[in-house]
Image: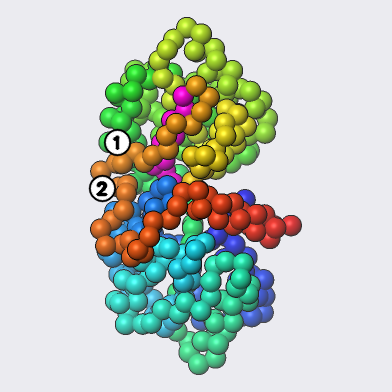
Amino acid sequence: MKSAFQNMIVLLTLAGSALAISNPIYVISNAEVPSLFRPGLSPVGLQRATQCLPQLFSTLNIGKIITCPQSEDSCFETLATTQPIADALGLPIDTSCGADENTSDNCVSDLTKKFAKNSTQSILIVWPSLFRPGLSPIGEQRVAQCLPQLFSTLDIGKIISCPRNDESQVCFETLATAQPIADALGLPIDTTCGADENTSDDCISGLTTKFAKSSTQAILIVWEFSEVHTLLEESLDLDTDPADAIDGIHYDVFTTVIKGKITQVTSQNCTDIDGIAPGTDKSKRRRSVAGAGEKRRRRERKSRSRQL
């Protein structure tokens, strides 16, 4: 499934000759955001937006900045990411184009063409969501300093993770995430079950059932982030709608399952990494988890339709 960032590239590509301009175009995603549909930027995201990005783009001769406006569906964090750059460069932010289904696919390309008629300066586009493989420095900080301590008090008796699969391009980061926890707890990592289509949907439930026959300890599952939806709904046969446990791509989501039901979905609350950074939540309302979940599903349906 394409991310919103990838859809942005699709929209620009669809323009074809419309983007045959000499102006360099730089496309970035919004900075890191809190999990569980909370608005604003995370502490890490605020650091990126205020300390890294203005300096990065100060030397690239930016003449126009484009981002999407905040709406009920998306772009809660793009303005928080973009504003420090705009302030540093002394430029306005063009929010003419939304990131929802009500905006023409040609909107952004039309803006770039119009600007290119009168200027050779670069164009910066800030759009939702950009995902790359591997652990970031913040990811390494999370797995080394936060997760072992978090799970040390939860009486973990078994750790399950998926093995790296080069063919299906999944589970590149799961072992790197699980290993420090396993080392701290003195437990092996069971990688019997893959996260691809070659693994039975019953593999995970089979492992948990077998373990539960001889132990009452907790089971920790560390899984490929793009396959968490499949893990919860198909492998574990859980109803995710009440808790809306599928929260996009956030690395701090901590889902608790007891007696076949999701009882809690919360943040790992790693210090200086997770949560809402002060001053970045400019909205006067909190996005409802249920409502945001439905909007997420609408965006996913739209993304799938674009691939057809």
Q: Amino acid at mark 1?
A: Cys
Name the image quarter holding residue 15.
bottom right
Name the image quarter holding residue 2.
bottom right
Q: Residue furthest top?
A: 214
| Image quadrant containing the C terminus | bottom right
- Residue at 55 percent across and 87 percent down: it is 114
Q: Secondary structure at mark 1?
A: helix
- Residue at 62 percent across and 67 percent down: it is 101
Residue 272: x, y in percent?
Answer: 25, 48
Q: Crowding at label 2, few (<14), some or many (≥20) Cα neighbours within 10 Å?
A: few
Residue 131 forms part of the magenta stretch: no
Q: Are marks 2 and 1 in contact (CB under 8 Å)?
A: no
Q: Secondary structure at mark 2?
A: loop
Question: Quick one: 236 or 144, which is closer to the camera?
Answer: 236
**Above or below 169: residue 155:** above
Instruction: Tell me the CA gap for discs 2 and 1.
Output: 11 Å
Q: Which residue is mark 1?
A: 146
Q: Amino acid at mark 2?
A: Asp
**Above or below 178: residue 68:** below
**Above or below 4: residue 237:** above
Q: Residue furthest right?
A: 308
Q: Write the start and end of the magenta stretch as one range.
A: 249-258
Residue 251 forms part of the magenta stretch: yes
- Residue at 49 percent across and 57 percent down: it is 130
Q: Crowding at label 1, few (<14), some or many (≥20) Cα neighbours within 10 Å?
A: some
Residue 95: x, y in percent?
Answer: 47, 77
Q: Which residue is mark 2?
A: 272
- Residue at 57 percent across and 66 percent down: it is 100
The disc, 2 or 1, on the residue closer to the chain's N-terminal end is 1
The mark found on residue 283 in the picture is none
Residue 284: x, y in percent?
Answer: 35, 63
